[in-house]
Image: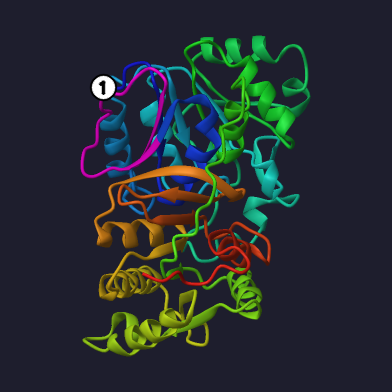
Amino acid sequence: MLENGLLVLADDLSGAVETAACLRPLGQSTTVELARQDPAPTAHNAQAVVVMDLDIRALPATEAGRITSVALRGAGDRVFVKIDSQLRGNVGAVLSAAADRPLVVAPALPALRRSVVGGVAHLHGVPLHRSDAWQVEGTSPPRSIAEALTPLPCRTIALETVRSASLRAALAECIATGEVPICDGEMDADLDAVVAAAPDGARLAGSGGLAAALGRTAPEPADETPITPTGNPLLLVVGTASPEAAEQLRIAELRGMRTVACSTTDLVGQGTSESALSRALVALERGPTALRIDPSEPVAPGQSRNLVRGLASTAARIVERQPGPVDIVLTGGETARLVLDALGVRRLVPVGQIHHGAVHSRTPAGTSVVTRPGSFGESDSLARIVEHLRPAGIERLPK
């Protein structure tokens, strides 16, 4: 079991690493564990922050809840549950498993203008259920956070209460009646107030915004580890076909990055992926290279996950074909997890954030891995990540 350290549970890898970066100031050590079947907290010192990626976002709800319950056995009260700010995944099943102890929920993410007002998630001021954020999910988004948490009994803590002196009493009363408080929030200060007012022993559940608020309670910020260019080849794997990702790739290409587009045949065909593999190997010899799904081909419903698996498999084969280590950039939690699983990576140590959600980590072997949720980042996000790992004037170093 975890001995007085802080345990964090996340349902996908990019969210796990995002949360770990936010919580680094709280611990003498912070690690991200890529959990396998039936994970359980292992012994760590009292100053450790251990983030477990349970990899359960795409699982059936009952299985996601069961795995969460197993991970929480013996974990105590010092638990943070990372949920998606857009409420994707098995939010209700995961928080039902965590609600065997008092639970306070605050999913706002001010850094990306994702707020909660009246118990409803909003994206840039638009209610989630009226946005197009779930257009590739295959289902409709919940109309409220309470609906996402069904069957848990919930009560919305309105914004005016969050910003008042009565917040602590409101949270305590809600928990005393057996309800889960869902806190409104628009700004970082709102989330800071929730962390400060949460009853002792209550578990916190929220997005990276609430994790950042918890991290701000540390007496000092975490030190950033200086970047030492490795000279390794740099491979980016972009597992989303969103318009935002297309623009990010375009900006990075203008600054010298190469892109290899993989067709459906490349990724799910029988024995035909050598084409994309060969093109990527040649490009990687010349400099930073991005691997992506060909945006010109329509994706049939239900095919996207197979394409992402094929993309991850191709990326792993590229890395394995290299004579030495490769640094990698992974966008999207599912893509990141599949690539690292294929490469046998079981643990990451975050060393700093390039921008919110784009976290630079090291593997046990010392290579760099940058992970970022697929929906995060401005148009220059990928360019900034490449420039972070390959500062201006630094080319491939001789071996």
Q: Residue at x 33, y 64 (%)?
A: 325
Q: Looking at the rendering, which quadrant does residue 45 occupy?
A: top left
Q: Is residue 31 above or below residue 384?
A: above
Query: Front-most of 368 and 280?
Result: 368
- Residue that label 1 marks: 1
Q: Is residue 35 within the magenta segment?
A: yes
Question: Closest to the observer: 399 or 76?
Answer: 399
Q: Residue at x 32, y 57 (%)?
A: 340
User: Residue 278's x, y, as percent?
Assistant: 33, 87
Q: Position of residue 353 (x, y in %)?
A: 57, 47
Write down the region rendered in magenta. 31-53
Residue 101 placement: quadrant: top left
Image quadrant in which the N terminus is located: top left
Give the crowd class for mark 1: few <14, some 14-19, many >=20 residues within 10 Å.
some
Q: Nearer the viewer, residue 376 or 301?
A: 376
Above or below, comparing residue 178 to residue 296 in the picture: above
Q: Is residue 40 magenta?
A: yes
Give the residue at x 55% y 36%: 22
Residue 221 % position (x, y): 61, 29
Left or right: residue 218 compared with residue 90: right
Q: Is residue 94 visible?
A: yes
Q: Residue furthest front?
A: 398
